[in-house]
Amino acid sequence: MCGIVGYVGKHNPKDFLLEGLKTLEYRGYDSAGIALKNNEETQIIKSVGKIKFLEEKVNNSLLIDSKIGIAHTRWATHGAPTENNAHPHCVGKVTIVHNGIIENAREIKDKLKVNFNSDTDTEVAAALIDYYYDGDEISAISKAVTELTGSYAFGILFEDSDKLYAVRKGSPLIIGINDKENYIASDITAIINYTNKYILLEEGEIAVLSAELVKVFKDGKEIKKDVIIADISAEAKSKQGFDHYMLKEIMEEPMLIENTLKPFVEDMSLIPDLKKYSEIHIVACGSAMYAGMIGKALLEEKASIRVICEVASEYRYKKVLYDKNTLVILVSQSGETADTIAAMRKAKEEGADTLAIVNVKTSTIARETDKQIFIEAGPEIAVATTKAYILQVAIFGLLAYKAASLNNLADEVKKLPRYVKEILDNRDLYLKIANEIYKDNDVFFIGRKTDYAICMEGSLKLKEVSYVHSEAYQAGELKHGTISLIEDGTPVFGIITDDDIRDKTISNIEEVKSRGAKVIIVSNKKVPGYDMEVIVPKISEFFQPILVVPCLQLIAYEVAKLRGCDIDKPKNLAKSVTVE
Ligand code: M6R
């Protein structure tokens, strides 16, 4: 959600900044802009839509000779996605790019006597920094940020300075370190082609970058920061010959399942023991929450632990009753989702233990939780999560397995990568199913218990990448209203993997079939009377969802492809939702 990249060094930053923005495209955006500066002037160029439009404009405009610049992809919050509202914004001597939301922008605007050119909260922040600027950049930034509420990562240029400034709260920002050039970026992928060395900027710190040096200040004093070496390669973020990142990331699932689970299989003592908690709260957003729903079903059914699974945006504001022995599990690919971070902080304030199931090791959630399990997915670029979700589900399988006091883990897990690979190899079948449904406007997914949690993810995947309306329903609940929407030819996916309620779900599927539904069965056993079906191998219930969801991911992918959608960057979506 918004991408920031900045450069100071020995070269003209134009190409670096445009390349960085392209790398950050996956975060979601609707407009983009760039600012280059030298001793005489600052040139700002912006455009609405894809970065290629910005690139055309930049290449057609006379760009100043410069060695310092900032650039931005904007995902609109305050104000429509117009060129005027795109960043960078310049007020007085200050030019900034911003990721986040300034919640008190209205009040600050009223106090400052400035004619604003945009509808954005960012321009207000620029005006506030300029208001306090009297030649001391650090002092101006600190005074301004103490007045701001909300979240921000700022890249800042001052007319009188040849340095690049950065500060953050809530939204991510890293400082890249190189020889005679330094960078700021929303994440490491934007700079990994140039350097793997970086500094994590913490809240309350201000970074000052020149070509030679990076200095970080806290409360007016310079502090020492650790330089981190990123463990991702430039190759890991390439498409490696696949048409889309989404497809590449799905195809990585067998290898990643093996790598992620291996240490736990070899040493089960690495799996946290959840039995010691009287209550568990699983809190997350979107797909991560749906992975949590599978965790809840498994932990309750198999280990008899009381579990609440809640969307983070609700959990953070509602009255939550904490037992004195509560564990809160935060699930997040990015580790930077604003609502999940807020839920984590609430749980900590209440004295609960916190455990993260997270992909990005340097993220806020990874750093602030008591314990972490890393899913080792590597960079996930497609906005729609696939491999990270599967690994989150695999971790919940492990946690439930240990909590159920079982110890044959190696046997259960050994077959998983091979089975998932076989499932992924069945692409003709998924394309055939996609061909049957891609022109339909409404699709339903029905199932019970863990199968219902699988339905939630299958349905989300389809709607986010293909823009087909779809709904997931508990199979038994359909007849309490929603079945009125089932017409001749309405596609309904029936997910049946749980033997205990198999016959019940089949009865519900019969109900929609007799109303004309086009039924697609996804099961681990043949259901007589249905032709359109995906049959996956039957394995332990702890890991069964891992064999079902990849089929649904590939069907969503094929439907999106047939409908000509922008699969890796669906409209209106952002990869990392850093505002609430
Ligand atoms: O980075 P996170 O796992 O915290 O992100 C949570 C959701 O925003 C994310 O899963 C979202 O629902 C995806 N677009 C789903 O594909």
Image (cartoon, grey):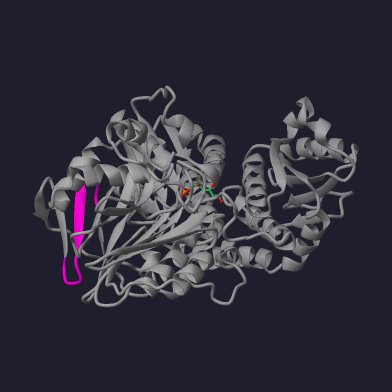
Q: Which residues are magenta?
A: 201-213
Where in the figure is residue 475, as x and y percent of width and height? 74, 35
Where in the figure is residue 389, as x and y percent of width and height? 53, 52
Residue 331's place in the image compared with 434, above or below, is: above
Does residue 404 appear anywhere in the picture? yes
Query: Is 556 or 37 nearer to us in this picture?
Result: 37
Q: Main secondary structure of the magenta part?
A: loop
Q: Is residue 80 left or right of residue 224?
A: right
**Of all residues shown, which one is farthest toward the left?**
221
Q: Is residue 10 left or right of residue 14?
A: left
Query: Is 530 or 189 nearer to us in this picture?
Result: 189
Magenta-span inclusion, residue 210: yes
Residue at the (80%, 36%) spot, across then down:
508
Q: Quadrant of the C terminus?
A: top left
Magenta-span inclusion, residue 527: no
In the picture, residue 266 is in which quadrant?
bottom left
Where in the figure is residue 407, as x and y percent of width and height? 47, 51
Does residue 370 appear anywhere in the picture? no
